[in-house]
Structures are given as C-alpha cells and as structure tokens.
Amino acid sequence: TQLLEQSPQFLSIQEGENLTVYCNSSSVFSSLQWYRQEPGEGPVLLVTVVTGGEVKKLKRLTFQFGDARKDSSLHITAAQPGDTGLYLCAGNGSSNTGKLIFGQGTTLQVKP
Amino acid sequence: NAGVTQTPKFRVLKTGQSMTLLCAQDMNHEYMYWYRQDPGMGLRLIHYSVGEGTTAKGEVPDGYNVSRLKKQNFLLGLESAAPSQTSVYFCASSLGRYNEQFFGPGTRLTVL
C-alpha cells in the first residue's frame, strides 16, 4: 500500500515568516500534486510535479519533487493571512489508474 | 460552467437509513471520483468511474455503492447508514487519468 506522510500537521505562524511543508513516502510516484483547501470548499489544484528534481514556482510558493520521486516539499516565502488553509499533497500511484493517494494534510494559519 | 456540483450540502441520518448523494459535472470529463474526508486522514477514495456505465472500488468502498448511468452524473449510495460514515464527502472529476481533478464543494453527512 502506498502512503504519503505530511509534516507538520499543524502550523501557526506570523505574517511575513517562511515555512516548509513536507510530503514523504517510501514508494515512487509517477507524479505528485499539491492542493489547497479552504473551509467549506473542495481542494483546488496548485501544481503538479512530474520529473524527479523538478522545481516549480507559483508567486511566493516553491514546490520541489525529490530526485527519486518519493518526496516533495512546499515552501512559502513571506506568508500572508490569505495563505491560511489546508494543504494536501497527492500522488499518482503505481496502479496506472489515475487514482490519487492523499497525505493527511497540513493546516496552516497565518496571523496578521 | 458550474464545474462540479453536489447535492445535498448537509444531511443528518439515523443509523440504518439510506440515502443517495448526487454529483454532477458539466465539463464532459470521463473520470469521476467519490472521496471521504475525515480529520487528520486527508481524502480517501471510496469509488471511482473511468467512463459512463463503469465503476470501480477505491480504498474504502465498504458500505457504499455507486452508479454512473450518465456521463455527467455520479451517484453515491449508502444502503444502511452507520455512525462510522459520518464524514464530509467530496466528488471530483477529471478529463483523463493523469489530469487535474476538479472537486465539488462537499456534502457534510452526520449519522446519529
């Protein structure tokens, strides 16, 4: 069974601070996605990483896929209150069916 | 485009009652999915469909049934609700197996 472990599970920081969220597995994933979910809504895709070692930037957010495609990280620079939400990583597994395996999520609170 | 819609938004059931959750998408997507989200557990796949008339089991299928009679609709049924099925249910759709999944707003179900 493929599993994704996210850490930390909760993060409460002040506006302007930097943070990193980690998503780790012992399994290889063909691709990995990061979603953001706000209360009362469904997750929304932020980025997909496909190639080992790939780095993608989305404004103040930097996403990295590990060289061995077993782990990923999300780094936020100068966090803003609008970044508050639940961040989920999800991997496309080995079954080739398109099924996503989700991590437990990281709840981020950015205080003004 | 409405995207992915779910009805109802909230529902309270008594143990043993049955109900059907409806998911509709207007993006002509082939793939549709039902997830449940519980605190600290991310999203877990219940059932999915790779096209009209087809369904398959996900990670946690027990106690649920699904049908995809029309391409745009994916129904999730609970035949005899149990308190363990108290959760938030999300429907999602995607164009293909490796494409972005678009999520609905969720249905909050409480089983007493």
Image: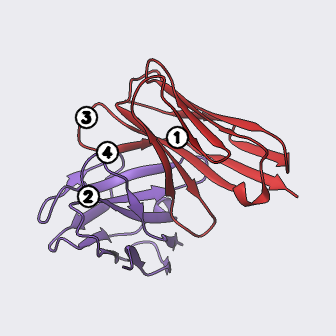
| Discs 1 and 2 carry the same chain letter | no
Disc 1 chain ID = A
Q: Position of residue B24 (x, y in %)?
A: 31, 76
Q: Residues within 10 Å of mark 1 (few under 14, many from 20)?
A: many
Return the residue at label 4. A99
| Discs 1 and 4 carry the same chain letter | yes
User: Which amino acid, by three-letter code, is at mark 3?
Assistant: Ser
User: Which amino acid, by three-letter code, is at mark 1?
Assistant: Gly
Tell me how far mark 2 sits from mark 3, CA to CA. 18 Å
User: Which amino acid, by three-letter code, is at mark 2?
Assistant: Leu
Disc 4 chain ID = A
Disc 2 chain ID = B
State the residue lying farthest toward the left. B53
Tell me how far mark 4 sits from mark 2, CA to CA. 13 Å
- Mark 4 or 2, closer to the camera: 2
Q: Is residue A57 left or right of residue A19?
A: left
Residue B69 visible, this angle: yes
- Mark 1 or 2, closer to the camera: 2
- The earlier-in-sequence mark between 3 and 1 is 3
Return the residue at label 3. A95
Tell me how far mark 1 sits from mark 4, CA to CA. 13 Å
| Discs 4 and 2 carry the same chain letter | no
Q: Secondary structure at mark 3?
A: loop
- Mark 2 or 3, closer to the camera: 2
